Amino acid sequence: MTHSITTKCTGCTACLKICPVMAIDGERKLLHIIDPALCIDCGACGRICPVDAVDDTLDQQIFHTRRTQWLKPVVKALKCISCMVCLQSCPVNCLDWGTPDLKSHRAIPVLHLPALCIACEFCAQACPVEAIEMLVPELPTPNQG
Amino acid sequence: MNNTRPYRGKILWVDLSTGAFREEIIPDEIYRQYLSGLGLATYILYRDLPPRADALGPENILGFVSGMLTGTRSLFTGRWIAVARSPLTGTWGEANCGGRFSPAIKQCGYDGIFFTGISPKPVYLYVDNAGPKLLDASDLWGQETYATEEALQARSPKGQKPAMACIGPAGEKLSLISGICHDLGRFAARAGLGAVMGSKRLKAVVLAGSWPIGCADPVTMERLSKRCASYYQARIPMPGSKVLPYLGAFVNKFPLGFPIDGMIEVLVFKKWGTAGTYQMAVEWGDAPIKNWAGSNKDYPIPVSAGVDPDKVLEKEERKYACYACPLSCGGICKFGPEGREAHKPEYETLMAFGGMQLNTDLETLFEIHDRLNRAGMDSISAGATIAYAMECFEKGIITIEDTGGIDLRWGQARASLALLEKMIDREGIGDLFADGVKKACERLGGRGSEGAIHAGGQEPAFHDSRLDPGFALHASIEPNPGRHTSGAQIYYEMYRLWRRCKSLPKPPLLYSKKSKYHTSPVMAQKAVAISCYTQLYNAAGLCFFGALLGTDRLGFFEGLNAALGWDLEPEAYLEIGKRIQTLRQMFNLRQGVDPKSIRISRRLLGLPPQKEGANKDRTIALDGMLHDYYQAIGWDPETGIPLAETVAALGLSGQERAA
């Protein structure tokens, strides 16, 4: 069972706009629905919903969080093996390679477009060596809101 | 999507003749028997490809498959495989590539994508979470690979970074040595599968799905990956590359053989990539010189120093790692006066156009490498074919009039590039050589056939069987002949299978080098184990370089159980490998290929033996090795046809095509 929208939905379209795979359909001020065939269970709809109208895969209600408080990936340089798994797993392509180290020629991923990050944690879950930690940004920049 | 299962349980069929799509649900039982990746592809092609299918006709099936372990937090498991009946060899054809295409297949919701038919006009396949679409590629037809990928990226939705595989002009012109390009210069190069794609007028496959990939036991997988990564994170200081040829010479001169540990590969590849082995291989006797007829005496250290790995490294701007790779053997280099970017050339490309042709001009080798990548041509086959052309030129079989003024003497790197241009364009004499050495030799009326080096029609990669006879054996017995990654005696030492399979013998610490050249039951047992393991790790999507680290350090069998939630013994997994290997052999028989017709060229067997150099006076008794291999794997020792009892024991009876 994928994420689903309950009857509490007010049709504000916030979820429709943030869904990275366009799995949500609905008209303004009308109940929205999630297409289970398209949903990737990133949970962004639940976090953005102002009226807590989204249930997760276990039918548990997801509560709204201010977007400035959403967890963001922080790559731990000493653990990272530069294997690209996090970049490939990101559904919104907000990660990209950082500047390569002059000596080793290795780069590690950085949160290149923090405004796009939806806090799905796919990158942290996919990382083979636990090199990504999801943290609340300390100093949110204006474009993160 | 099931997030506890590493496979999708379905494949996509695309009929290019009609533009129709069909999803096929694959029963769990098939994954139990074949895993995914190469295993699934073998099952599908054997089941559905008609006998004696025209490799460039509509009936041929071109498949792209992901690996079972891809996306499960495992390491080294980002390999994808293209499969079809090979137009180059007429046999089972497969080509293996890294990059990020393998996870992209699964992220689109499939374990494999299979094409049939021929499109009436050039098309490309685009798949995202919403499903597949065939789109017009008329404007891309004729474009080089880099331009194609850049154009397709430009027409993707903003912010999207799809994974792509495409062909260049070589594939479009049905060169039998053309490959499939991915990520601006990674290649599924072998077996001529670029021509199969070209014959179907399929310019590219673009994958933009984003479904996460499951794993039954991610905690165990993470533990295994951390352990594996620790071998690569160790900071071991390395000397400059100047010592490497002397290391190769030492191993060659040392009176006894000894097992080679995969950690050597870790250290060399991590710093230089595969180019790091260049001079070492020459002195060791692993590298072929002058179209396999010369030796390290013809290409001594001061000469081969033109391709000193440190010089290659000077051009590297940053490392390139495939998906899930802790090694980063790849790199992005800048070369030429304009500072053009290209992937770092591999050992095989450098040796194909370096030692094989006595070239040493690194800057021109970079140009050749870049040209091959843009055109979509296999560097191994192209280099070997030009080396053959040079031998023909030396013998007067072709003249400067025939070549259109190209002076094809040994060591003329610019001449190599000029002939390559003609091969890509199929212009003049280039057309004669554009389909590999076997076809070229036929077109020359069989003249110079002793220098047309191939196994079953495919040019072997540049690892000398006179140093390691396992290369000759596996190039001759594998259903996809002429491949260097299929097997070799040294691989047995590096795979360390005996650490997990107690029935397999541990190599002695020291052994007589002469023992490598004569068959024995133990040697056949090892060769079969290598074959089975190779098929198995190709079903898992594992990189060959990961396998070389050793199955115990990698945690390969434990990883399969963790990903799948199974509890199989390593021997049971090797049985899956044997099933895949046997079914590939049955595929060849179905396609009318006589296993005994596949033999590596006599020159690589030391017939006649070399008179000097690292492999002086070494000859290989191949027939006995073939006999013993066939017997050990359960195929008829005389004919190479799988025995009925073997077929039955592997559950392969009744796999005939339903139609």
Image (tube, helix red, strand yellow):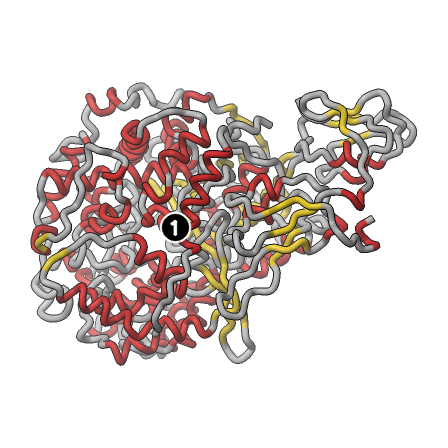
Picture quadrant of residue A43: top right
Residue B590 visible: no
Please tell me which residue lies in front, B605 or B566: B566
Picture quadrant of residue B143: bottom right
Say which quadrant the C terminus of chain B sits in: top left
Looking at the picture, which amino acid does disc 1 mark? Gly
Horizontal side of residue B398 vs B657, given as left or right: left
Residue B102 placement (x, y as % from top left): 50, 43
- The answer for which chain carries disc 1 is B
Near mark 1 (Cα within 10 A), the count class, few <14, some 14-19 or many ≥20, is many
Residue B231 visible: yes
Residue displayed at 17% across by 75% down: B297
Please tell me which residue lies in front, B214 or B32: B214
SS label for mark 1: helix
Q: Mark 1 points at which residue?
A: B192
Count of residue discs: 1
In the image as oriented, which residue stretches furthest toward the right?
A29
Say which quadrant the N terminus of chain B sits in: top right
Please tell me which residue lies in front, B328 or B263: B263
Position above or below: B612 against A80: below
Residue B253 placement (x, y as % from top left): 13, 66
Residue B437 placement (x, y as % from top left): 28, 59
Residue B157 placement (x, y as % from top left): 71, 48
Horizontal side of residue B143 vs B293, given as left or right: right
Please tell me which residue lies in front, B116 or A78: A78
Horizontal side of residue B457 vs B544, given as left or right: left
Residue displayed at 80% across by 50% down: A144
Residue displayed at 27% across by 50% down: B482
